[in-house]
Image: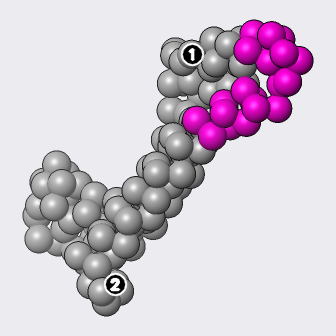
Amino acid sequence: MITIGLHFGTYLSEVYRGALEGVSKTQWEACRALNFSTAYTYRRIVLPQAFPIAIPGMGNYLVGIFKDTPLLSTIGVAELFHAATAVGGYNYRYLEPYTMVGIIFLILSVPAAMWVRKLEKTVNVAQGKIKQ
């Protein structure tokens, strides 16, 4: 868990940095000219503009977590594959159990990707970037 957290935390920090840099510098200058505090500037001006920019990257890494956890054999994936191998060993038919493991991962990752797509559309509609 720590390894996955550190691995994806470093990539997500770059997504956040890119989103913050995606906010126009004139927004910062306007806030300084109006004498807004740094906390107020982030909370009310910068973060609401940076969040829609960061959604696609965050969604990619959310789905990436589902895909990369089998490589690290954590979060029960090793047990799933071990169970599939054991079931396949009873009758020497490995295709069906491994297909079920793949379906389980699809059941986890496809709704997550759809949720991220819906979130991105909702935020864009709320900000008036696209029409419903």
Check the image and report above or below for 121 versus 64. Answer: below
Separation of residues labelled 1 and 2 (CA atoms) = 41 Å
Q: Residue 65 is drawn in which quadrant?
A: top right
The kind of residue on which mark 2 rests is Lys
Could you tell me which residue is drawn at 73 percent across and 36 percent down?
A: 99
Horizontal and vertical percent for residue 28?
Answer: 29, 66
**In what element is the residue under mark 2?**
loop
Could you tell me which residue is drawn at 63 percent across and 27 percent down?
A: 69
First in residue order: circle 1 vs circle 2: 1
- Is residue 123 magenta-colored? no
**Mark number displayed over residue 127:** none
Could you tell me which residue is drawn at 46 percent across and 49 percent down?
A: 112
Give the residues in magenta. Answer: 86-104
The kind of residue on which mark 1 rests is Gly
Residue, disc 1: 76
Check the image and report above or below for 42 versus 98. Answer: below
Residue, disc 2: 129
Horizontal and vertical percent for residue 77?
Answer: 63, 20
Taken as a whole, is the magenta stretch helix, strand or loop?
helix
Most extreme residue toward the bottom is: 131
Q: Crowdedness of circle 2 by 10 Å Cα count: few (<14), some, many (20+)? A: few
Task: Give 60 or 39, whichever is nearer the viewer.
Answer: 60
Q: Viewed as shown, does residue 94 lie left or right of 103?
A: right
